[in-house]
Amino acid sequence: MKRSSDAFDSRRPIGMFDSGIGGISILREIRKLLPAENIIYLADQTHVPYGPRPLEEVQRFSQGITAYLLEQGAKLIVVACNTASAASLQDLRRGFPTLPFVGMEPAVKPAAETTQSRVVGVLATPTTFQGELYASVVERFAEGVTVLPSVLPGLVEQIEAGQLEHAHTRQILEQGIQPLLEAGADTLVLACTHYPFVIPLIREIAGNAVQVIDPSPAIARQTARLLEQATHRNDQQAQGTLRFVTSGDPAFMSDQLDRLGVSGIRVEEVCWTTAETELSQAD
């Protein structure tokens, strides 16, 4: 039997990170399912977007951010970014073997199981499509299904700027989605955590007959499963705390959170040092 001093403190936070605010789509679902959990969310907005960056660079960012979140007491890390998951998830699990990770895996499996036309479109960033994770998912789950990739250049930046209904946002989506529809896709997989914020626009463009798969609820369920397996779930009755940090401008992120309905929370600034791959609290 462990001594009480060695007992695990289930009040330790869940750590989450993304290049920007995209992971808030995941955070919302985790908060619904696990309301007692304390959460620290890091937005690496100095380097947003991750999508066009080389895999090795995203790996360095992910390693440093994970080290920072671990220093803050994180008991589990949600890599709330498809690009970072594709580039770094296997590397992170090797580098931090005792820390549970939840990554973003493109939801090709449910898409392949439900498509009627046998054609599925995947909306993601270039780095996501380059990663081994995407290729593995398609190989394992998409037998007999045509999976068509589509990148949406500039969409993450539009969402970060709060331009969710802007004409240019619609143009980006139309250019990325129309070729998929013309090829017979009846299912669209959102493989970037920013993209759920423009689901209403996607539905307008694709039409009601096209299924749009948002992986956020499944990620929340996986987070709960891993916490249960490790007996690290916080079962207190009180509402968990939220802590937001950014490597960019805290005032700007605070405005972004207000637009997304997350208000009244102070955003802290962190200083990101790429040469040393570590994050430290800014003065």
Image (tube, rainbow, N blue to C red):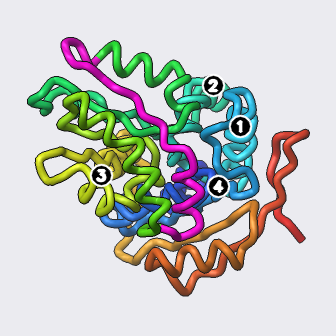
- In the rendered structure, which disc, 1 or 2, sits on the residue that comes first in sequence? 1
Secondary structure under the numbered disc 4 in the rendered image: loop
Counting from the top left corner in percent of width and height, residue 107 is at 31, 35
4 vs 3, front mark: 3
Q: Determine the residue positioned at 55% across, 44% down.
A: 153
- The residues tagged by marks 4 and 2 sit, at their Cα atoms, a distance apart of 20 Å
Tell me the crowding category of disc 1: few under 14, some 14 to 19, or many 20 or more residues within 10 angstroms, Cα based: some
Q: Amino acid at mark 1?
A: Gln
- Tell me: residue 211, above or below residue 88: below
Q: Is residue 238 magenta?
A: no
**Residue of label 2:** 91
**Residue of label 3:** 217
Q: State the residue in front, 54 or 184.
A: 184
- In the rendered structure, which disc, 1 or 4, sits on the residue that comes first in sequence? 1
Do callouts 1 and 2 mark residues in contact (Cβ within 8 Å)?
Answer: yes
- The residues tagged by marks 1 and 2 sit, at their Cα atoms, a distance apart of 8 Å
Per the rendering, the mark at residue 63 is 1
Q: Amino acid at mark 2?
A: Asp
- The residues tagged by marks 3 and 2 sit, at their Cα atoms, a distance apart of 25 Å
Position of 156 compared to 227: left or right? right
Per the rendering, the mark at residue 166 is none
Secondary structure under the numbered disc 2 in the rendered image: helix
Quadrant containing the C terminus is bottom right
Q: Which residues are magenta?
A: 141-163
Counting from the top left corner in percent of width and height, residue 142 is at 26, 18
- Number of on-image labels: 4
1 vs 4, front mark: 1
